[in-house]
Amino acid sequence: MNKLGITKFDAVCAQLDAAIELYFVSDNFIAAHTLAAAAHQILTDIVKPKGDNPPFIKSGYLNRFPNAKHKEIIKFINNAHVFFKHAKTDPHGSLDFNPEITELFLIDACAYFKDSGEQKPKNYKIFLAWAGEINKEKAKETSLGQFAADIVEKMKATNNKKLFWDAFPNLREGP
């Protein structure tokens, strides 16, 4: 096999695409979270030196708390990601994991792409629809748009992510 030239943004997009797909179609919460958190971390590392706004959860969110709390909050945010990747200090450890934090990492990472000129992950649109980022004002302009927005809202209310994924293949075709 030939070597592939891969940029960090290529890695971020690939990891987010896989994490989003797992989030919708699999019960493998650990893999989905590990990929989402890894993409989020790479994205944070890339954009900080450029002066761009990094994903909010590890930057703007922290600004709401006194500096003395920052380490504690970062540890909480990274707890599952670190647990799923390392065992050096706790080879027999256990974790109470809330898979909903994965959605937070996905929302935060996808939010970066909303206003950036970077290529968006191919599963970007379906995740934004799930997260409620449909332009509701634009949808109200036509009855068909309003109908589509209503369907998305009702499907999300059922919390059946697999059904949502299957119902909107056109949102998985890329940006």
Image: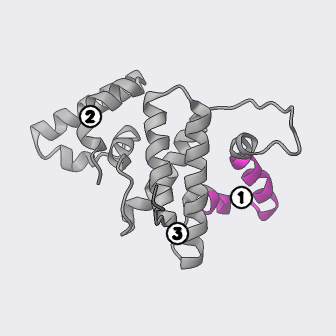
Judge left or right: residue 78 versus residue 156.
right
Instruction: Give the residues drawn in magenta, as a range.
Output: 58-78
Question: Circle 1 sits in a helix, a strand or a loop, which is it?
Answer: loop
Disc number placed over residue 65 in the picture, else none = 1
Residue 158 point in image, percent of width and height: 39, 21
Q: Earlier in the sequence, mark 2 or mark 3?
A: 3
Question: Circle 3 sits in a helix, a strand or a loop, which is it?
Answer: loop
Q: Does the segment drawn in magenta span residue 94?
A: no
Numbered circles on residues, count:
3
Q: State the residue in front, 12 or 127.
A: 12
On the image, numbered disc 2 is attached to which residue?
168
- The residue most toward the front is 1
Q: CA distance from mark 1 to mark 2?
A: 39 Å
Q: Residue at x 50, y 58 (%)?
A: 11
Q: Residue at x 31, y 26 (%)?
A: 154
- Circle 1 or circle 3, nearest the eye: 3
Q: Earlier in the sequence, mark 1 or mark 2?
A: 1
Q: CA distance from mark 2 to mark 3?
A: 30 Å
